[in-house]
Image (cartoon, helix red, strand yellow):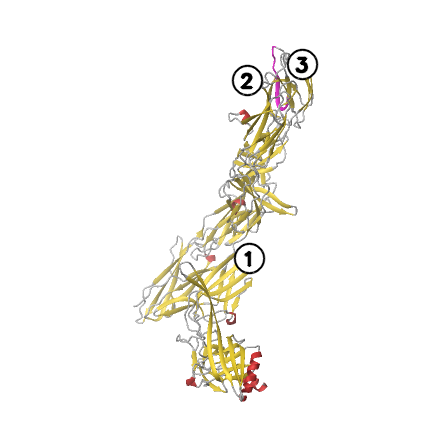
Amino acid sequence: MAKKASKKPNGLTIARNNMKFACSWKKGESYSDKQQFSYLVDRVGKSDKWTAAANIGKGVTSKAVSLSLKNYYPYAGKPKISGFKFRVRGLSKKKKWSDWVNQTFDINLPAKPTLSVSPSETNDNQCTFTWNVDTSNAHNAFTDVEIQTKLVENYDYGGDKGWSAGTGGASGSKTYTETASTIATGSHTRWFRVRSRGARGASEWQYACRVYASPYAPTNVKAQVTNQAGGMQTKVTWSQTRNNAYPVNSTAAEYVIKVPDEKLSYTGAADGVLGTIAGAGGAVSSFISQNLGKDECLFVRASATHLNKTTYSGWVLASVGYLKDPEITDIQTDDSTFRASITAENKSEVLGAFLVVLYRTGSEPDKAAVVGIIPAGETKTTVQCPDWSKEDSYEFGVYACIGSFAAIARADSVDSYSVTVKMQSQASIWQGGQVPHAPTGVKVNATAISGTVKIVWDWTWKDAQSAIISWADHEDAWESTDEPETYTISNTHAGEWNVSGLETGKRWYFRVRLVKGSGETGVYGAWSAIAVIDLSSAPAIPSLSLSQSVISKGGSVSAFWSYVSTDGTSQAYAEICEASLTGEGVQYGEVIASAETAQHVTLYSDKLGWDTGQTHYLCVRVVSGSGRVSDAWSDPVPIVIADKLTASIESTSLIQQEITVEDHTRTVLALTAMPLTVKVSGAGTGGMTTLVIERAEDYHMDRPDETDFTGFAGETIALFSQTGESQITINREDLIGALDDGASYRMIASVSDSLGQSDAEELIFEVHWAHQAVMPEGKAIISDRVAMITPIIPEGFAEGDTCDIYRLSADRPELIISAGKFGTTYVDPYPAIGEFGGHRIVYRTVDGDYITADNEIAWLDLTAEDGDLLDLNFSLIDFEGEQIEFIYDVTHSNAWDKDFKETRYLGGSVTGDWNKAVGRTASLKGSTVTIKDQETMKKFRRLATYPGICHIRTVDGSSFACDIQVSEDRSYDKDMIRAEYSLSVTRVDPEEPEGQELSEWISEEESE
């Protein structure tokens, strides 16, 4: 007995309370009057039996079986199932049953849920857990999800006890708000878990949690500061403790520049942020574009943040500036006791600052001794000095100090102190005796010559005979092995000198000292205070550009900027910050990215915490190799975070159709009838939807007007734009090209939004009209120099089908009737003269098709053989209801003008730019003779002044609309007047097709 193997079930549909199996098979070919069907449900851990065989008809090939989900897990006490089976057999004509043929549909565990947690943006004590289960696979039978949650101290959820339980659908969310007093101290964690359940069993648990805790404060904070031109390069390191119960989302380093207290410490708010690191970072390095002023110190600290809670380390002293310089107001000395009273003003604002009194002699000007202390709050002290009677000169000095001091006992009873310095003024202030004073008023000024500066100073020692100018590119050169350069000049010069050959892009430090004598016998004064000139200049304010203006959440954007040096140095590094636009202008926020020599950097939205719907403004500034910072940040450039725009062709009126050509069958999307409807999604309510239809491939076919156009790939057939996502309907009259039967086309749907995003989707389809054209029939009659053409309704005509009528001439066929009616007589007022004349009737379906089901061109040519012949031996000119017969001595010439532009290249190659338009001009010359042609001559005069479109028919078979320019030459004989006419004819397109219905023609003739 013949039998066929059964197929697998077509599918499983899971409704709210049941599973529906669609069973199908291919029956045997020799069944007589019936088949039998039964099924079995495999329960886990049990042996199940087939249902009683059900008799079904011999022609049945499918059957549906529904099982109630309530009869299986997870419903209480219900079994789990692992599969569904069915079997079929048929009864032969000899009344014998075929073998059973069975098939199995496996039931698997449902898919594991995905689970995420997100904190509330408005409530610090609230979070939301969201889950989703993929139910698209019918084998993964799904019933519900089981959800459990609990709040625990610290982090460990402690096993399976204490969970509160519930159930839910395939997707959903739960929001929990914690009591503020419960989570006020210590660490608490809200745990949440979910698993999916189905008839086969339950998936694994998926876990997520939200921790409520303030992070541990950073410890072991240290700082390393390097002074640079224009600021301080500052590196801060720290230690950070974290664990699951006390997590850290980000850490940051802050700084403040303030006048310290007497212990050189500080408590208070920060000036700015050096840098922020995602997670528990331990180091930040950044440039502070500010130097310490007098009496100021730099302090740093570190912070740790978990969500909205931040903890701070204490402030740490990072860099110490100089105290304000004191001033000596009076010195009184006693040459017998060698004691001196020193009065000085302490100008420092740092509490606890005291003054240190120094003493030196002219014989040893470089050896100064500490001889006294003026405590904080006091202005005067008396000091005991060594015997200075044999010294030519001596001098006292002071400097301000924070630290400690102690008296040192000496056998000669001279005052002496040891000083421990934590912070002090920059240089000692000296006054007194004949010891050469350091020059004052030292200044350095730029000149008009690059690399040349002018240094000026005051000659503060009248006995000085020369001055030594010294310079270096680092301020500690006078206390290092890297000695400065020097140049000695005599005091016959004024106190100024030019120094040339300095490298630009640097800071230069200058000092001057005065000298009496020279060499080892010379007396050298102290170096002046340092004078500084900066030959560097800030780079130009950069401009910032972004690789794109809109990115999706999780995407990235590349930032590019310009760097223009003004002092010859290259970029040292650049910083990008996030700015905000307020009513007060641009507010610059924290630095979010930096680069060294590169002029680009990639920013990742996830790392920066950018979210969908946000707009961020970015600015950049640059620092030159000379340490100069651009004068301002660049203009802000916006970057928008938005959902990616996706175009989708949701539905069309196209249908799937099998096309067979020479035993080859393929399935295509086919347009079978107009209108074409398309539904495009992606633009939303405010975006722009654009639909373009273009040819996908070149398509060669004959056209009724015999143009050389064959349908090129890329030709636009239809173009439609709208706002929003409403259904698009394209009718035949909306087309700007031809939809040819059998041709392939590309549908391009694109969407765009106000953010500049766009996307497109393409769909290839072919045209296979359901309704095909048929071969037309018709007849034509020539009467009174006009043609009357009647298309006859052919067999196969359908409602909405029309015909086009073309005039045949020696030139290309010309359309005179569009969308005409079969059975209606039409008039061609200008049929062509001679054997080239006639008319072409083209059958067009309601969809515009003129190809028959046999793939033939559906048109009929009526020629002289059909009586469609105007037989004249002269040309005709028609204008404004009049007609001129051009009979005598006629000469006729034609010229065609192709619109072609030639371009020649070296080597002789030629390329051309083509325009498909072709112009045509013609000239006619002829005569009128004798008095009997006076009326014709008058018509030529009226033609000469007629400003409208004319029509000309020539004996060589042309018939076309034109402009006619008339020239006339007359000669006078005794018996006759002879006129010679020259006509310049330029072909023009008629304003509309020139054919008419016969009824319209008759009506116009009667009205004239």
Boundaries of the magenta span: 398-411
State the image coordinates of residue 5 (x, y, percent, origin top left): 33, 64
x%, y% of residue 235? 54, 34
Q: Quadrant of the N terminus?
A: bottom left
Q: Are marks 3 and 2 in contact (CB under 8 Å)?
A: no
Give the mark nearest the N terminus, 3 or 2: 3
Residue 400 forms part of the magenta stretch? yes
Circle 2 sits on which residue?
Answer: 520
Q: Earlier in the sequence, mark 2 or mark 1?
A: 2
Label 1: which secondary element: loop
Q: Nearer the viewer, mark 3 or mark 2?
A: 2
Q: Are marks 1 and 3 in contact (CB under 8 Å)?
A: no
Label 3: which secondary element: strand
Which mark, residue 339? Answer: 3
Q: Which residue is mark 1?
A: 753
Mark 1 or mark 3: which is in front?
Answer: 3
User: In the rendered structure, does residue 262 fall within the stretch colored magenta?
Assistant: no
Disc 2 marks which amino acid? Glu
Q: Position of residue 449 (x, y in %)?
A: 57, 36
Q: Is residue 93 left or right of residue 834?
A: left
* Neighbour tally class for label 2: few under 14, some 14-19, many 20 plus, Cα within 10 Å: few
Residue lying farthest front? Answer: 974
